Amino acid sequence: MPPTALRLFVPLVISIAVAGGCIEKRPRKREGATARAATSSAPKQASPDAVDDRLAHLVEGDRYRVPVGAADPWQGAGDPLVTIVEYSDFECPFCGQLASNIAAALERYPDDVRLVFKQFPLAMHARAEPAARAAVAAGAQGKFWEMHDALFGDRGKLGDNDLVAHATAIGLDVAAWKSAYADPTTARKVADELAEGRALEVSSTPTFFVNGRKVTGAKNVETLSQIIEEERAMALRLVAAGAARSEVYARIFRAAKLGAAPVKAEAPPPTPAPTADPAHKRGEPSKIPNYAIPVGAATPTRGPADAPVTVIAFVAYGCADCQAALGELAKLATSHPELRIAIRQMPATDDKAQNAAAGAAVAAAAQGKFWELHEQLAAATTLDPIGVLRLAGGVGLDTSRLQKDLAAELTTRILTEDAAVANTTRGTQTAPFFFVNGRFADGRATASDLAALAAEETGKATAFAKDKRVAANDLYAAMRKTWRGVALVDAVPQLTAGDVGR
């Protein structure tokens, strides 16, 4: 028994897949078969390591070793003869059809069949991966199936606002759901199941395994029932030969020869990126591509230098919108210290106070106090040049030196570079706005929004580093060379480490 397969074969928790109002009703709830959260107690099922091979000759045909785990949503029989594991995509119309058909088929076998639901978002479906995370996040509050129903109930409503509306409608604690939705561990679970499916040679949805027997497509109720009857008959032969019902899946798993599951990925593979942005206006930054925005030699950063994700904020100080956006950025930095945060200046050209604040922030870096002054400026809704100096003195800056550095050529060059880099991409956008590994987000983005983007980009960055064998310290620069507009951005005059001298 491969150690990986044994590790993944934990007590089963299973539930029936159903979809909104367009499908038949759920199976009647029964003791031991009620839909439940992933953290609830599981049926008592034997591990493959706890059974021998003496009945392996009764397991007929090609079978896959399909792992199931305590975090997998489930419904159905608590002590089944037949276990169905489905790999599904919430944006796939055939998956919705299969959900309806399985619901009907399981009603015929309430004591003998259970189903595990696994995530398998296809790259061709732009909203499948976010929908998968939405369902997993709902499962953390014991409402996986309610979210599942809402998602399959209207596959045309899988946008960000739609997902929030579904969470609200099914009675979730929306703030907690948003946090779970954006949590990298949620993306990791989806990615792990996707990788697991690929190891089992899943290439289309829906694909499901009935006692390890691979089936593809939205089979009708009668075909499903026929397959279940065949597997039920084989399971009864195992029971007649001395296997306990709780050993049936373990013995089938042990006898299977195909598709042993891989070791769990250390990080999620790339999240499938949407190929079109319906809200995008020509000439404006799109939320879909990665733009080749560099971290300048003089750009202040906090967080690990080798972080897989860098958030670059273009900011202005002294306005309500900026204050709110920078507050969200501060929340992100606190909740996700694994990210690198970089600040570039984008004051309005005709606003003397904003320009004074931007220059002071840049000059403060020469005294090693950029972040101290930045926090004071970020909290201010209104500023004037005198007030900026007052704040600088309050954080311990030498204001005489600060005024000299404000007038220095280096400060002008840094501010000019920040504006020129932004102008390659920003269109008519004014500060504040963000780039998360080059993915644009406007100033209305919350900490949760930015964290969700970061979770997607972490997987892509990790896969890039592995594929290209790039060291962590060089990762952002290497990825940037493959992103949109790199030639345009690199044509902008930019400072070097030698120019900055710090």
Image (cartoon, helix red, strand yellow):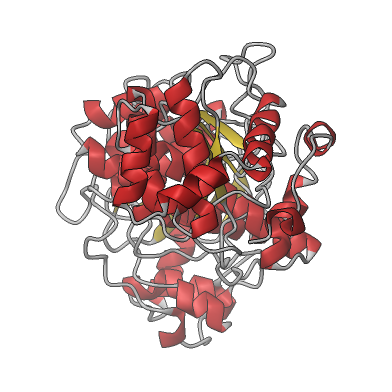
Q: Residue at x 41, y 55 (%)?
A: 336
Q: Quadrant of residue 212?
A: bottom right
Nearest to the observer: residue 454 or residue 236: 454
Q: Is residue 250 left or right of residue 94?
A: left
Q: Where residue 104 appears, x then y in whole percent?
A: 36, 34
Q: Quadrant of residue 24?
A: top left
Q: Where 443 sits versus 280, above or below?
A: below
Q: Is residue 306 left or right of residue 498?
A: left
Q: Is residue 14 left or right of residue 410?
A: left
Q: Residue at x 58, y 47 (%)?
A: 457
Q: Where residue 275 appears, x then y in whole percent?
A: 68, 27
Q: Is residue 471 left or right of residue 252?
A: right
Q: Residue furthest front?
A: 400
Nearest to the observer: residue 311 or residue 65: 311
Q: Quadrant of the C terminus?
A: bottom right
From where the camera sits, is residue 179 visible? yes
Q: Where 460 sits versus 416, above or below?
A: below
Nearest to the observer: residue 277 or residue 192: 277
Q: Residue furthest top?
A: 281
How many labels sit on residues?
Answer: 0
Q: Quadrant of the N terminus?
A: bottom right
Q: Where residue 439 appears, x then y in whole percent?
A: 60, 36
Q: Quadrant of residue 311?
A: top right
Q: Residue at x 62, y 70 (%)?
A: 260
Nearest to the observer: residue 246 or residue 329: 329
Q: Where residue 274 appears, x then y in whole percent?
A: 63, 30
From where the camera sits, is residue 109 visible? no
